[in-house]
Image: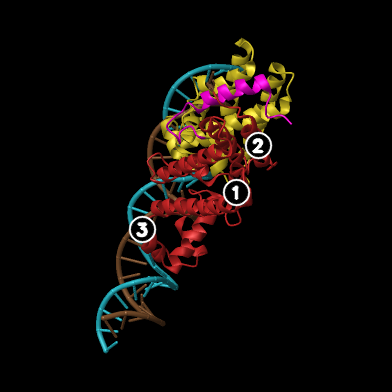
Chain colours: A yellow, B red, C cyan, D brown
Amino acid sequence: MTPAGQRVLDVASRLFYRDGINSVGVALVAETAEVTKKTLYDCFGSKQKLVVDYLRHRHEIWWSHLEQCLAEAGRPRTLTLVDAYLTHPNLRINRGCAFLNAAAELPADHPGLDVIRDHKKAVRARLADLVAEDAPAVDSESVAEHVFLLLEGAIAHIGIDDHNNRVQQVRQLATTLLDNGHGDR
Amino acid sequence: MTPAGQRVLDVASRLFYRDGINSVGVALVAETAEVTKKTLYDCFGSKQKLVVDYLRHRHEIWWSHLEQCLAEAGRPRTLTLVDAYLTHPNLRINRGCAFLNAAAELPADHPGLDVIRDHKKAVRARLADLVAEDAPAVDSESVAEHVFLLLEGAIAHIGIDDHNNRVQQVRQLATTLLDNGHGDR
DNA sequence: TTCTTGGTATACCGACCGGTATGGTTACCA
DNA sequence: TGGTAACCATACCGGTCGGTATACCAAGAA
């Protein structure tokens, strides 16, 4: 990817997340990235593809941050995943989940929806791994689903409610779940 | 509200929820409601106000349905609230939560955001009442928050994932929570 | 009977949308 | 030396956006 293309992607990621995909035109993206529309279209071909790349890019940043946190962390690493939502330096999570937000405004046939589904599936699967690792005694699938739902609920509410400590609450709830394994059966 | 105005609001509710607020123009709303744009603007004044009324309308429909379910239900009524998300006849919940979706695409200064916050706060408070009623022994605030997060997570994923039984899972988890009161402290 | 209310139909406005066309400039590389 | 790749600037395209203007019509109330 060329420097200009990288700049476009970075700017698009920031603006799409902050203001919504449909509210941000390609002209604004190009102008903010100090690039001509021609260059933008030479790099991405269409807004649709730019949106897909935005989602993929966002996933990659988040995923590599997660894996790095996991590599450095001690047990239980399930809580490390929860913490990763709070500690991320690059993507400021203050408008909820970029993927849920995108899913809310993209048309039903947009290829970006596949990226969103894959992202959620990946997080959900990684979470199941970690729960199985942390609490082998409990029904890990069920506890993973439980924690996943809590997390999704908390993140969806970031930027809506004022009190952002919901993720912290999820952390505490997850701790209890790992201990006594409730949510099984 | 005049008959034409009512028709506009009904159509707008359906289209805004199905396709997203920013993707639906006032011209399409007017045309679908078999009404002139002039009539639409006589009734609502602006798209912004139409959006606010859409959210309020959606809340009122949902709320009256909930209260009716609660009036007819036996204990525990916490589960009745969960069920209400599944059983609603009028508003087909197949694209996630209308309020979370709207919050994802509205600009930060849109007055509709207040309606969204109020709606969520109301549901959250009603849930706390019901938990206190169903399980007086447990820390009702904490369990209510727990169930609320589960519900929000499940509803946010309707229309993204294929398997829609997440609300059913929440029902089961909530049952367990009411029994043993975990999530407290 | 006149006047207000709630409509109709149509045409228009400026602004913005995603996307394209033309042409020029730099810099590196064979 | 010549060519190609990565950019720049600008202007334009058809279409849609939210919103307004003009003019007409029908029914119920004064």
Spatial CA distance of label 1 from label 2 is: 15 Å
Three-letter amino acid code of the residue under disc 2: Thr
Percent position (x, y) of residue A14?
Answer: 47, 30
Which residue lies at the image location 37% right of the left edge and 41% below the top edge? B109
Q: Tell which circle, 2 or 3, labels the residue nearer the N-terminal end.
A: 3
Q: Residue at x 55, y 54 (%)?
A: B68
Residue highlighted by disc 2: B175
Q: Using the image, determine if residue B76 lies above or below residue A86.
A: below
The residue identified by callout 3 is B45
Q: Look at the image and tell me in which quarter the N terminus of chain B lies.
A: bottom left
Marks 3/1: CA–CA distance? 33 Å
- In the rendered image, residue A38, in percent from the top left (x then y), is placed at 49, 36
The kind of secondary structure element at disc 2 is helix
Q: Residue at x 51, y 19 (%)?
A: A87
What's the CA distance linking mark 2 and mark 3?
A: 46 Å
Q: Residues within 10 Å of mark 1 (few under 14, many from 20)?
A: some
- SS state under label 1: helix
Q: Front-most of B22 and B127?
A: B127
Image height of B47 relative to A125, above or below = below
Q: Dots 3 and 1: beta carbons under 8 Å?
A: no
- In the rendered image, which quarter is residue A153 located in? top right
In the rendered structure, which disc, 3 or 1, sits on the residue that comes first in sequence? 3
Query: Residue A107: within the magenta?
Result: no
Q: Kindly identify which residue carries mark 1.
A: B84
**Letter of the chain that mark 3 sits on in the rendering:** B
